[in-house]
Image: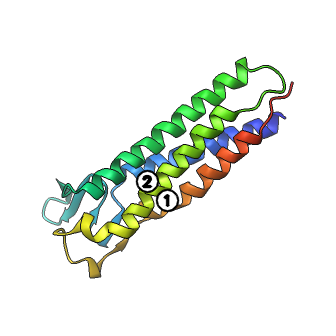
Amino acid sequence: MASLLIFITLLHLTILTVLFIATMEKFWWVWDNNARSDLWHNCRFDNETKDWLCDSSNETEWLHAVQVLMILAVIFSSISFLIFLAQLFTMSKGGLFYFTGVCQAFAGLNDFTAALIYTLHYKEILKGSRDLSSGHFGYCFILAWVCAPLLLCSGIMYIHLRKRE
């Protein structure tokens, strides 16, 4: 039982870390080594100062939806972890981690929806930034897609997990 709890805890913390990185890093769209975009900024590398110069992203309704959903995914996954820890120490023997699982699954649905919206509407989100044909999706976008099934699977795992002594 102890090894299962350690595995679940490490899995949850890993997913939470990857989700946070996907939300905050500057690699949702990459044009080349000198320009990239995320949910918050459009950045370009200045060769003279050897520094990144960032401007706020064009605010569109689609971008706001992705931002809100990714933040909600991080919040629900964090709440899920805290609830798991609380239930682990307070729940009686034989209890199920339903609330933890529901929060984690809801985080997965938020992440999935955000990644799907960005996939379908990246042209509207990035319009006016640069020529989109010379760019591609960055690793944070891929991390968001990887987190969605992991969050949903861990949510289902929590729902079926029973506390034992």
Distance from label 1 to label 2 (Cα)? 6 Å
- Give the position of the N terminus as an image quadrant: top right
Where is residue 89? Give x, y as percent.
71, 20
Where is residue 140? Give x, y as percent.
42, 59
17 over 125 or under it: above or below: above
The residue where tag 2 is placed is: 22
Q: Nearer the viewer, residue 28 or 64?
A: 64
The residue type indicated by label 1 comes to: Leu
The residue type indicated by label 2 comes to: Ala
Check whether the beta carbons of the residues at disc 1 and disc 2 lie within 8 A of each other: yes
Where is residue 34? Give x, y as percent.
25, 69
Q: Nearer the viewer, residue 40 or 158?
A: 158
**Which structural element holds mark 2?**
helix
The residue where tag 1 is placed is: 143
Q: Within 10 Å of the Cα at label 2, are there few (<14), some (14-19), or many (20+) other Cα atoms? A: many
At horizontal 22% and vertical 60% (from top left) the residue drawn is: 43
Horizontal placement of 165 versus 144: left or right? right
Q: Residue furthest left?
A: 48
Instruction: Give the quarter of the image for residue 3.
Output: top right
At horizontal 40% and vertical 68% (from top left) the residue drawn is: 119
The answer to whether one can see residue 34 in this image is no
